[in-house]
Amino acid sequence: MQPTKLFISHAWDDKADFVEPLVAALVDAGFEVWYDKFELNIGDSLRQKIDQGLKECDFGVVVLSPHFFAKKWPQAELDGLLALEEANRKLILPVWKDVGEAEVKKFSPILAGRLGATTTGGVAEVVRSIRRAVEVAQREAELKGSQSHLDRLASLEADSLNAKKARALTQSVDGARIAREAAETLVASLIPRIEALVEGSGQQFKLSMERPSETSIGVKGPYRLRVGLNYRNDCINSAEPGLLRLIATEATDPWGNDSSKFRILHRLELHPRLSADGSVSWKGGSSESEFSNDQLVEHFLDTVMNEIETLHAKRSKDT
């Protein structure tokens, strides 16, 4: 197991009488200590080295003292430690040297609210306090990890339960009704969009709308193009057999009188997919494609325009 890494943030004036003895005691206690005397060499960037130490440490031991409050760099290190802290992980372990609650609170109300080790009991007592704080934090981290696994298990349980509810709803009279209503809503959403296209179309690319039923709608366009959408389900007690077809065809009869003579340009077949809360999406049988009603509205209109453009390009090339 890797030793716990401690970053020591302190003022230079506290080195000789406290920090160096503390570092030696922490090393003897089995901690790995990031300490500027060990880590900074001639030519090193002070800021870069401090940033590296902050990122690599497990905890930051901050020696709060009158000298610390008066210096610039220790406060910058403290700001870095605070930035690295997460909401559920306490990274900073304060040590109060020659200061009381009033002084700490004036400097940092956040740190004043944390239990800090005091130097009145000597270096050995500070090391024991740091060890206890580290052990508590590590136990909390382990519990957090366990909770994460429990959350993942609970998520699987919820997904499984929702899947069962969705299957039960799909295979019911209510499910058949909900799927049909979703198809009716889809057609109703298409009507104003198609009407706008019909109204805006010119003589050369004249469009017209067909409305065979509440769950069917179509567009007739130039070059004997038809794009239709239809939902059908002959089963009244299950949505599973329901099928939504979107088909674009080109009539091959020059006069367009024989409906059996056509070429399929685009075909999309989808089944209703019900969720446990009754919402509906549309999913391809063997494909991964899945559409909401809004996405299908755009797909239908894109199909109309794409096929008109393709047929126009083909006719223009032929002539």
Image (cartoon, rainbow, N blue to C red):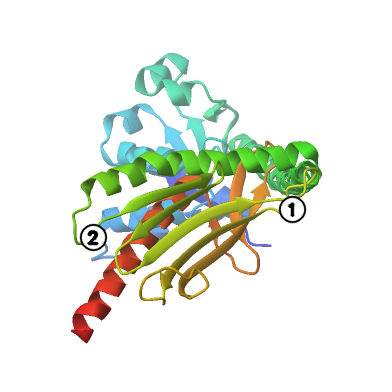
> Label for residue 62?
none
- Secondary structure beneath label 2: loop
Where, quadrant-wise, is the N terminus in this rendering?
bottom right
Q: Quadrant of residue 280?
A: top right
What residue is pinned by disc 2? 205
Answer with left or right where residue 219 lies relative to residue 167.
left
- What amino acid type is highlighted by mark number 1? Glu
Question: Which residue is found at the position 49% from the left and 68% from the top?
Answer: 259
Question: Which residue is found at the position 35% from the left and 22% from the top?
Answer: 107
Q: Position of residue 301 (x, y in %)?
A: 37, 54
Compare residues 82 and 101 and report the one nearer the observer.
82
Answer with left or right where residue 296 lies relative to residue 79.
right
Q: Nearer the viewer, mark 1 or mark 2?
A: 2
Q: CA distance from mark 1 to mark 2?
A: 39 Å
The mark nearer the N terminus, 1 or 2, is 2
Where, quadrant-wise, is the C terminus in this rendering?
bottom left
Neighbours of disc 2 within 10 Å: few (<14), some (14-19), many (20+): few
Compare residues 140 and 283 and report the one nearer the observer.
283
Q: Quadrant of residue 43?
A: bottom left
Q: Position of residue 141 (x, y in %)?
A: 66, 44
Residue 11 visible in image: no
Compare residues 155 and 151 and report the one nearer the observer.
155
- Secondary structure beneath label 1: loop
Q: Position of residue 316 (x, y in %)?
A: 19, 79
Residue 242 visible in image: yes
What residue is pinned by disc 1? 240
